Image (tube, rainbow, N blue to C red):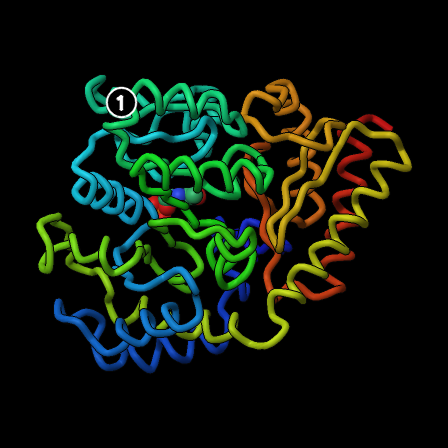
Amino acid sequence: MWDEDGNEFIDFCCSWGPLILGHANDDVLKKVSDVMALGTSFGTPTVLETELARLIVDNHRFVEKIRFVSSGTEATMSAIRMARGYTGRNKVIKFEGCYHGHVDSLLVKAGSGLATLGTSTSAGIPEGFANETIVLPLNDTIAIDEAISSYGNDIACIIIEPIPANNGLLLQDKEFLTYLRKVCSDNGILLFFDEVISGFRVGFEGAAGLYDIEPDIMAFGKIIGGGFPVGAYAAKKEIMSHISPEGPVYQAGTLSGNPVAMAAGIAQLTACLQDGFYEQMESKTAEFVNNIQSFADENKLPFHMFHVGSVFWASFSNKNRVQNADDIDPNSADRFKHFFDELIARGVYIGPSGYEVGFVSAAHTAEDLQTAADAFKSALAIAYGI
Ligand code: PMP
């Protein structure tokens, strides 16, 4: 990536995750420009929308039907409405530190930019909206049991980032996710995996595939749009049939499913489906992370790199398990600022917050990763004063 002054960076923000093939990928650009020459939006379905849907339905065990929208926020917002319409219930359980876009009722203890700004909830949200949201700590089955015994009959869904990646990378135990699956099934609650980051990132089937847990609803975004504005939500046909025009839950969008974004998504997901794609992404990310971690260990720095698939997070603490938003020391942000400036000075760009994860793309070469790892090491040495 080059900035306006011509400085070159190895980029690990990758537009916050969509660019799994890197910037300006040839296949994506070719498909987009071929399609764009025919028109950019028609306000009526095109076969490209069906093609992208088919690509996902055929290769994802848990997606029976999918609806395209234009952002991750729209996807979670619409899917929550669907969950309420389907169950006839009002309340939603979410978890501290999980971000689901800037949906009013979900901007409570939400991570992402809010974590960086040191606030937990946005202004401008009527109390009545937030009252419908029950916020619980991650990885705490007792809190779930208590919430269900108090509000069970009015809980429409439990929404979670199955790989929470907006407040650091708070990797959950599979047992916790399995527990959520069970309590949802037992209590008529829909289990909603927000896979806007993890979907098509940790594997084509995202976290649901990785943990082998079937959610009732999924939200997607980022990677499925190949760098264009796209989101989607998906579920079994029975649930999706509640969406208009088939069912009574209204949702629409002028540019939803537009051919340009669909074309980019088709090109990108086709590349992701190639044999060995995710294995390669995982192994080069592991090598990159281990390279940096060895340096931190040799120098006894209180620092830990977490990763899953091609997502990583640099944590400025020596805890090797961080599973709750509260486990992160807010003072570690100061160390991050210093580290970030030193990385920038060495031509490496990551998201400008200690709470954000980084993304390795298929375009990062072994040489790029070695150069970047060296920059991480010297930036760490300076940030820790060694
Ligand atoms: N859900 C999750 C898990 C996300 O990480 C994000 C964005 N980072 C969203 C929803 C919202 O997506 P968008 O920014 O496209 O509205």
Give the total number of marks visible in the rendering: 1
Q: Position of residue 294 (x, y in %)?
A: 85, 43
Split into quadrants, the picture shows ligand 1 in the one at top left
Compared with 177, 55 (above or below) is below
Residue drawn 32% across the image and 64% down it: 64
Is 252 situated left or right of 270 in this image?
Answer: left
Locate the N terminus and report the quarter of the image it occupies.
bottom right
Which element carries disc 1, helix, strand or loop? Answer: helix
Nearest to the observer: residue 80 or residue 291:
80
Is residue 93 at all visible to an observer of this figure?
A: yes
Pinpoint residue 181: horizontal percent, then vertical percent. Answer: 44, 42
| Foreground of the two, 113 or 55 | 55
Residue 40: x and y, percent? 22, 71
Report the amino acid beneath label 1. Ala
Q: Tag 1: Cα neighbours inside 10 Å, few (<14), some, or many (≥20)? A: some
Tell me the quadrant of the picture where the C terminus can be found.
top right
Residue labelled with disc 1? 130
